[in-house]
Amino acid sequence: MEYWKNDKEYMDLVKDILNIDEFQQLKNYKHHGDNRLNHCIRASYKSYKVTKKLKLRYKEVARAALLHDFFLVNNQEISIFERIKVLIIHPSIAVTNAKKYVELNKFEENIIRSHMFPVNPTLPRYFESVLVDLIDDYVSIYERRFTIKNSIVKLFNRK
């Protein structure tokens, strides 16, 4: 369900990012049982809603959270050691990729770089950075529950 598309203010904030061809390629990468594009949108929209409700910097949060996993590495095709490396460095890759297309201020950059704290050593410098980190974790767990459920169903459906 693409409920976020009906939120005009949100769409106005992120439509330029969603129209980037390279960013759209994220739909081709598995991520938490779905694809990386959908994951980024979920994390962004939830972060936007929470920070707007708290009267925080929700406009920048929506954009930075959308870009937080902007990396084109297929985790399914690399070794476990490479996956661990990507887990740690992908926030920096996401910043580099984002800067090819949009300007990031220090606030937005910190949100992206610190979204994997403490796995990645970049400290969240703003309350919004902490919120995006936590919401990203929440969204990841939410997405994983479908993968686990489907695995259990397949296990019991084997003959």
Image (cartoon, rainbow, N blue to C red):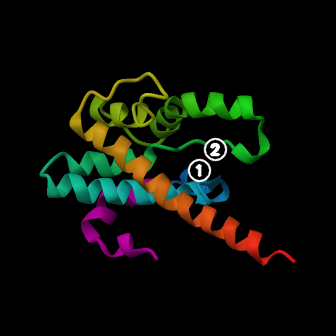
The circle drawn on residue 72 is 2
Quadrant of image for the C terminus: bottom right
Q: Are circles 1 and 2 on residues that touch, CB within 8 Å?
A: yes
Provide residue 23's location: percent of width, then percent of height.
54, 51
Question: Which contiguous range is marked in magenta?
Answer: 1-18
Three-letter amino acid code at the position of disc 2: Leu
Residue at the image position 78 percent from the left and 35 percent from the top: 79
Three-letter code for the amino acid on which mark 1 is drawn: Glu
Whether 154 is drawn above or below 72: the answer is below
Q: Tell me if 79 is positioned left or right of 33 in this view.
A: right
Quadrant in which residue 86 is drawn: top right
Residue at left 47%, top 40%?
98
Q: Which residue is mark 1?
A: 22
Disc 1 packing (10 Å; few <14; some 14–19; many ≥20): some
Q: Disc 1 and disc 2: Cα gap in Å? A: 9 Å
Q: Which residue is located at x 48 percent, y 26 percent?
A: 120
Instruction: Give left or right: position of 75 versus 60.
Output: right
Which of the two labelled residues, at mark 1 and mark 2, occupies the earlier sequence position?
1
At a point 74% along the width and 47% down the height, the residue shown is 76
Q: Nearer the viewer, residue 154 or 156?
A: 156
**Viewer-side residue, 99 vs 32:** 32
Relative height, residue 37 to residue 1 (above, below): above
